[in-house]
Image: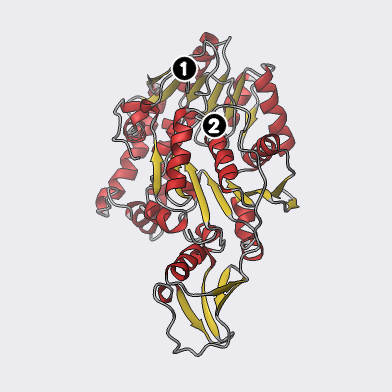
């Protein structure tokens, strides 16, 4: 009988086996012989595939690897799921409880996750990107199931049958605890592919896996790794496919072009010409993924290059935060003085500058957890009707009261822009959301804006629908 044991994020298969032993069909591709322990070793993430191969080949095995438990959970979670949540769960279950469900921000992915936990009824690890989301998920799961919920991250190391962890803490802990969970849920799973965080999935033997995101695409093309790490996209809906008001607030996106003042325009043009002149001289093309790296290497080789890099940052900073944008922010805050507003920036310096100019609370990654919680609570109650943030509120944090977003500056990332839109789309009676995008007229921001608005939420195009081993 073939034995399976878990060790430090891997599976040990067989005992005292010779290196030339022929493994059963379908298993050999996952394994390598390890002479140190005289058996074959595989990634813990291949546990489900290996068990399925053994089951299909009718080969007896002794499973000493898994240490996760079955849970007794309520099937009814206190409210009726929306149609797309039911469809998403059914698609995930049909795909052997593995895969991604892609839904717009604000449409209840966390409730779908609760449905998945109830469906799998196995000890569960939920992985989230931030401490804010850690606290939010832990509270929601505790209220849903009436069970103690463990947390890993932010100084907490509490392991329970249902546990929520940050990405960083999961990465550090998975080789110790990768055998203790039967279901792995990865929130904002577009962070998962890559050399570091992908190890979370590879070191965990959970046979059931659910990835949640609004924007699965990545600029590096590593979305192809989802199939191996979590499973394929098994269900997807875009904003334009969901009914307004019942699922999301009605919304509009408004680009606002702001001209540079004369002195700023002169400085911008001088810096941009120096930067682009260096790019042309060195025949660097930013149309390829390697363009930025080539530019940085060229800049590092000479004083001229160093000056060109400084010119790049000068022209970028001028376009991100000219005086006209601050004047426009003042006008918009006055026009929406009875609304709940989030002001987004690309960098901390601009966020703090706006906070100082208008006497507004600012949340960045430097903001201490207690202060951040206090700011968010005051925003929800209306004591603080405006919040300024750089990037920390882009993902997941639930602020349903927000109905106005002002994007002062941002990257060219489609994901970032869609996430910022999602922050103001939580439905409430009579709510209409507006996202203002401030664009410095006559600068490179025009092209950045065009690039990051290539999403059905902005184009109005609706994409085509996508729609037994004893684990």
Residue topped by disc 1 = 245
Q: In this rendering, would 86 be left or right of 379?
A: left
Quadrant containing the C terminus is bottom right
Q: Residue at x 48, y 61 (%)?
A: 195
- The percent coordinates of residue 51 (x first, y second) are 50, 67
Viewport quadrant of the N terminus:
bottom right
Q: Is residue 7 above or below residue 111?
A: below
Kind of element beneath mark 1: loop
Relative to the observer, which residue lies in front, 413 or 366? 413
- Residue 124, image x and y in percent? 62, 50
Q: Is residue 371 above or below residue 437?
A: below
Q: Which mark is residue 350?
A: 2
**Residue at (61% x, 38% y) in the render:** 75
Residue 410 is at least partly visible in this image = no
The total number of labels drawn is 2
Which colour style is shown?
secondary structure
How far apart marks 1 and 2 lie (CA) works out to: 34 Å
Taking the image as drawn, is residue 248 in sight? yes
The local crowd at label 1, few if under 14, some if 14 to 19, many if 20 or more residues have their Cα within 10 Å, is some
Q: Nearer the viewer, mark 1 or mark 2?
A: 1
Badge 2 element: helix
Q: Earlier in the sequence, mark 1 or mark 2?
A: 1
Which image quadrant is residue 461 in? Answer: top left
Q: Nearer the viewer, residue 420 or 93?
A: 93
Q: Is 78 positioned to the left or the right of 26 in the image?
A: right
- From what the image shows, is residue 413 above or below residue 207? above
Residue density around tag 2, few if under 14, some if 14–19, many if 20 or more, within 10 Å: many
């Amino acid at each position: 009988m073939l034995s399976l044991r878990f060790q430090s994020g891997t599976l040990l298969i067989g005992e005292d086996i010779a290196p030339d032993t022929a493994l059963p069909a379908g298993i050999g591709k996952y394994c390598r012989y390890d002479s140190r322990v005289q058996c074959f070793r595989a990634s813990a993430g291949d546990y489900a595939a290996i068990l399925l191969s053994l089951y299909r080949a009718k080969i007896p095995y002794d499973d000493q690897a898994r240490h996760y438990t079955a849970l007794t959970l309520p099937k009814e979670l206190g409210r009726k799921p929306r149609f797309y949540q039911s469809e998403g769960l059914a698609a995930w279950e049909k795909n052997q409880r593995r895969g991604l469900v892609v839904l717009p921000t604000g449409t209840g992915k966390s409730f779908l996750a609760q449905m998945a936990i109830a469906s799998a009824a196995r000890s569960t690890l939920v992985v989230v990107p931030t401490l804010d989301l850690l606290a939010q998920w832990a509270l929601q799961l505790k209220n849903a199931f009436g069970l103690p919920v463990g947390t890993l991250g932010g100084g907490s190391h509490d392991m329970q049958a249902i546990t929520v962890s940050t990405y960083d803490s999961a990465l550090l802990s998975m080789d110790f605890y990768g055998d203790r969970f039967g279901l792995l849920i990865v929130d904002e799973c577009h962070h998962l592919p890559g050399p570091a965080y992908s190890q979370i999935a590879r070191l965990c033997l959970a046979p059931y896996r659910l990835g949640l995101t609004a924007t699965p695409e990545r600029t590096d093309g590593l979305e192809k790794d989802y199939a191996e790490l979590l499973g394929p996209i098994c269900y997807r809906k875009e904003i334009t496919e969901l009914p307004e008001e019942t699922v999301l607030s009605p919304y509009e996106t408004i680009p606002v072009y702001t001209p540079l003042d004369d002195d700023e325009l002169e400085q911008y043009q001088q810096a941009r010409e120096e930067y682009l002149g260096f790019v042309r001289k060195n025949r660097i093309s930013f149309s390829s993924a390697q363009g930025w790296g080539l530019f940085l290497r060229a800049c590092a080789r000479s004083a001229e290059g160093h000056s060109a890099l400084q010119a790049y940052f000068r022209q970028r900073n001028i376009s991100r935060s000219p005086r006209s944008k601050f004047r426009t922010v003042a006008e918009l805050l006055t026009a929406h003085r009875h609304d709940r507003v989030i002001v987004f920036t690309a960098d901390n310096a601009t966020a703090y500058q706006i906070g100082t100019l208008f006497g507004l609370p600012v949340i960045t990654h430097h903001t201490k957890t207690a202060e951040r919680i206090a700011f968010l609570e005051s925003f929800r109650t209306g004591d603080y009707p405006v919040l300024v943030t750089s990037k920390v509120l882009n993902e997941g944090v639930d602020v349903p009261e927000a109905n106005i977003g002002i994007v002062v500056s941002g990257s060219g990332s489609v994901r970032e822009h869609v996430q910022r839109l999602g922050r103001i789309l939580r439905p409430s009676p009579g709510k209409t959301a507006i996202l203002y995008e401030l664009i410095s007229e006559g600068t490179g921001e025009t092209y950045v804006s065009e690039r990051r608005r290539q999403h059905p939420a902005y184009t109005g195009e609706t994409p085509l629908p996508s729609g037994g081993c004893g684990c």
